[in-house]
């Protein structure tokens, strides 16, 4: 499986643990900081920050906590921000279902995961039942 | 420790007051530390060296009070712990003239001081945390004003990063303000919100529905271009909720609604 944004010159990785709901806010702030550093436009920044918010909250609520690793990456066509969310929670048994608009196993709107995918340029979901979930997203400058 | 009581206590107070200098009065320090000193001597006499034991209850209570006061007065953990650790300095001075027996006693008392010092830092931290979380709550209250924009129209400007707790507080306040002011319209302005995700949107939608059940209409204003695009990409639908680009547009819409309602009731808009 290809990991988006790999094979690029990587900046330093910054990590935000996701353990409390305050950490979701901090993850969002780190995403914003990286987006600004990378030079994403205001619209792109807002999209990335919102995706980070969704994925961080899923990590907390469904994954039972985890972490976000973020970095500025570059390729020939430009730079981007890569965010990696990992948890060691229950995993997602049916990813097609989880990625369906409006489907939630809880009381959410069921738009976080599918919406986050639409908000970024690259989206990779890896999950294993009983092992955990990792979501990697990249937003590139255009 | 009993024998050279005054000497030791004086040395101790000396060191502490040098560190805390002008920020605690000498008289207060004197009282605080003498009280503590007596309690320690008493505990040592009756109950051995386990600072968690019953005999040390009084000492622990005094230390909790001391660290609580220091935390409230804005002292650092180090400045707080010095009150206990400085006891060692006083002891060391006595040691210079002491016998080998004194050295053993010093080491024992030193361990004891460490245990009490750690206890002090712990209770300091607990107090700090309490202070911080109550400040956070106060901020939450302060940062979510509900204002009366017009007779019958209230407004809630949302500013900053919204987490679930804050959004919930705002929404509850808004619903209460509708009742308290007898208003029929509420404008939620999100100009100052950097991002709207599904959680915030869900709170917004729930509030609008709840307000509707109360016979009031909510208008969401201040939806900036980047927020609008993000909401669309996320797939959130605001349905038949009235949204406006600016607060002025929203107010105009609200007032129009009110005057329509007024003319239906046969009241002039000028009275509103
Ligand atoms: N990290 C994760 N670990 C386990 N399950 C997950 C994880 N992330 C998402 N899921 C599952 O996928 C479903 C869909 O997620 P999604 O974020 O789209 O919706 P939601 O969180 O339920 O609601 P919303 O995000 O709209 O408030 C979740 O209800 C949950 O069952
Ligand atoms: Mg979600």
Image (tube, rainbow, N blue to C red):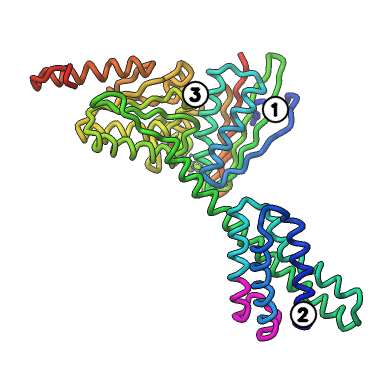
Mark 3 lies on a secondary structure that is: helix
The prevailing secondary structure element of the residues shown in magenta is helix
Q: Quadrant of the N terminus of chain B?
A: bottom right
Tell whether A12 sits left or right of B189.
right
Residue at mark 3: chain? A
Tell whether A89 sits left or right of B16.
left
- The dot on residue B185 is none
Q: Quadrant of the C terminus of chain B?
A: top left
Check disc 3 and report the residue beneath it: A118
Note whether ligand 1 is within 8 Å of mark 2: no
Tell whether B159 sits left or right of B204.
right
Residue positioned 78% across, 62% down in the render = B15
Residue positioned 27% across, 26% down in the render = B153
Q: How far apart in space, not on screen, are marks 2 and 3 (Cα)? A: 73 Å
Q: Quadrant of residue B57?
A: bottom right
Tell whether B25 sits left or right of B12.
left
Check disc 1 and report the residue beneath it: A6
Residue at mark 1: chain? A
Q: Quadrant of residue B107?
A: bottom right
Note whether A60 is above or below B253 in the view shown. below
Return the x and y of residue B92 as percentages of the image width and height. 85, 71
Q: Dot 3 surroundings within 10 Å: few (below 14), some, or many (20 or more)?
A: some
Residue positioned 88% across, 75% down in the render = B95
Q: How far apart in space, not on screen, are marks 3 and 1 (Cα)? A: 20 Å
Mark 1 lies on a secondary structure that is: loop
Give, as a single range, the part of the protein colored magenta. Answer: B44-60
Check disc 2 and report the residue beneath it: B1
Q: Nearer the viewer, residue A112 or B266?
A: B266
Please tell me whether mark 1 or mark 2 is closer to you in this view.
2
**Is A43 included in the stretch rendered in magenta?**
no
């Amino acid at each position: 499986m290809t990991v988006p944004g790999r094979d690029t010159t990587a900046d330093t990785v910054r990590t935000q643990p996701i353990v409390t709901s305050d950490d979701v806010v901090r993850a969002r702030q780190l995403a914003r900081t990286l987006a600004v550093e990378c030079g994403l436009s205001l619209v792109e920044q807002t999209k990335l920050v919102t995706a980070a918010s969704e994925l961080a909250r899923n990590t907390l609520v469904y994954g039972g906590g985890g972490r976000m690793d973020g970095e500025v990456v570059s390729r020939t066509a430009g730079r981007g921000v890569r965010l990696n969310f990992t948890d060691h929670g229950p995993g997602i048994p049916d990813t097609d279902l989880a990625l369906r608009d409006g489907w939630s196993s809880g009381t959410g709107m069921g738009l976080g995961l599918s919406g986050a995918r639409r908000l970024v340029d690259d989206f990779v979901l890896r999950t294993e039942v009983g092992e955990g979930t990792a979501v990697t997203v990249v937003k590139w400058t255009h | 420790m009993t024998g050279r009581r005054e000497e030791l206590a004086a040395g101790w107070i000396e060191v502490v007051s040098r560190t805390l200098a002008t920020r605690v009065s000498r008289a207060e320090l004197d009282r605080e530390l003498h009280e503590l000193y007596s309690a320690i001597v008493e505990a040592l006499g009756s109950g051995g060296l386990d600072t968690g034991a019953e005999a040390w209850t009084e000492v622990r209570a005094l230390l909790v009070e001391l660290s609580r006061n220091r935390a409230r007065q804005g002292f650092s953990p180090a400045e707080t712990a010095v009150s206990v650790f400085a006891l060692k300095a006083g002891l060391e001075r006595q040691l210079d003239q002491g016998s080998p027996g004194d050295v053993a006693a010093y080491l024992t008392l030193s361990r004891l001081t460490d245990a009490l010092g750690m206890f002090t830092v712990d209770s300091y931290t607990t107090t700090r945390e309490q202070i911080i979380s109550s400040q956070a709550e106060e901020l939450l209250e302060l940062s979510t004003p509900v204002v009366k924009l017009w007779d019958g129209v209230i407004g809630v400007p949302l500013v900053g990063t919204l987490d679930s707790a804050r959004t919930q507080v705002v929404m509850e306040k808004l619903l209460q303000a509708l009742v308290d002011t007898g208003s029929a319209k509420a404008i939620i302005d999100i100009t100052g919100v950097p991002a709207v995700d599904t959680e915030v949107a869900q709170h917004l939608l729930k509030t609008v529905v709840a307000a509707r059940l109360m016979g009031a209409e909510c208008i969401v204003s201040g939806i900036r271009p980047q927020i609008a695009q993000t909401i669309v990409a996320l797939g959130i639908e605001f349905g038949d909720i009235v949204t406006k680009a600016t607060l002025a547009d929203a107010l105009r819409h609200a007032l129009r609604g009110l005057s329509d309602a007024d003319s239906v009731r046969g009241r002039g808009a000028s009275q509103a």
